[in-house]
């Protein structure tokens, strides 16, 4: 006589599957009951013009139009520096072997990069010079640099 093919382990697994199915059906029934009273429609939140979260939608009449072209990204342009006025300054550092240096402006104490190609005559450190500034990819550079001759007494 042959014994039953169903073992204790198989019966236990079948009971667990049945229990899972019943639990899932209970959860679905609970969700349906809760959706009628609350639901996702009541969970909508809005952000007002001050950045606060509120449950009232914004009033379209108070909305302001903003021109996207007027928004400036990055560092704001400095119109004062853009002009090609002649400035005076002092050579603070210059490396003749590499061909570059820095000029410190007398008025604003701002430093500008200078390359040997932008010099009209050879300069050394502590020389007083006149120059103009020009915007380049890496920033503002001193161009058309001329040494100021000291006044003869």
Image: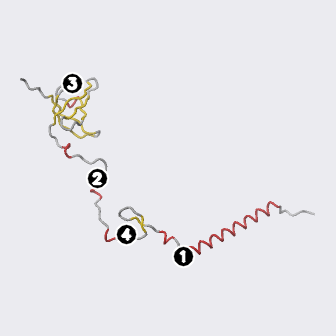
SS label for mark 3:
loop
SS label for mark 1:
helix
Which residue was labeled with disc 4? 58
* Disc 3 to disc 4: CB gap under 8 Å: no
Mark 2 residue crowding within 10 angstroms, few (<14) / some (14–19) / many (20+): few
Q: Distance between the Cα atoms at labels 1 and 4?
A: 25 Å
Mark 4 residue crowding within 10 angstroms, few (<14) / some (14–19) / many (20+): few
Position in image of residue 131 (x %, y %): 17, 34
In the rendered structure, which disc, 1 or 2, sits on the residue that comes first in sequence? 1
Position in image of residue 135 (x %, y %): 24, 41
Foreground tag (3 vs 4) = 4
Residue 125 or residue 113, whichever sits in front: 125
Q: Distance between the Cα atoms at labels 1 and 3?
A: 84 Å
Which residue was labeled with disc 1? 37
Which residue was labeled with disc 2? 72
Foreground tag (1 vs 3) = 1
Query: Please, which residue is most extreme toward the right here?
Result: 1
Q: Does residue 142 lie above or below 41 as drawn?
A: above
Compared across the picture, whether 54 is left or right of 93 comes to right
Foreground tag (4 vs 2) = 4
* Residue located 28% across and 40% down the image: 137
Q: Distance between the Cα atoms at labels 3 and 4?
A: 66 Å
Position in image of residue 61 (x %, y %): 31, 71
Position in image of residue 41 (x %, y %): 49, 72
Q: Which mark is residue 124?
A: 3
* Figure quadrant of the N terminus: bottom right
Compared across the picture, whether 9 is left or right of 43 comes to right
Q: Distance between the Cα atoms at labels 4 and 2?
A: 27 Å
* Residue located 15% across and 28% down the image: 147
Q: Which mark is residue 10?
A: none
């Amino acid at each position: 006589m042959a014994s039953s093919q169903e073992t204790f382990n198989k019966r236990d697994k079948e009971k667990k599957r049945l229990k899972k199915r019943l639990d899932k059906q209970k959860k679905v029934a609970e969700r349906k009951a809760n959706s009628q009273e609350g639901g996702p429609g009541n969970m909508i939140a809005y952000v007002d013009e001050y950045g606060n979260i509120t449950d009232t939608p914004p009033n379209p009449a108070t909305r302001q139009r903003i021109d996207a072209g007027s928004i400036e990204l990055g560092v704001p342009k400095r119109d004062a520096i853009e002009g090609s006025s002649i400035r005076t300054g002092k050579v603070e550092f210059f490396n003749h072997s590499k061909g570059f240096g820095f000029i410190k402006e007398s008025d604003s104490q701002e430093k500008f990069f200078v390359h040997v190609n932008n010099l009209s005559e050879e300069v050394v450190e502590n020389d007083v010079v006149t120059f103009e500034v020009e915007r380049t990819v890496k920033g503002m550079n001193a161009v058309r640099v001329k040494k100021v001759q000291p006044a003869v007494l």
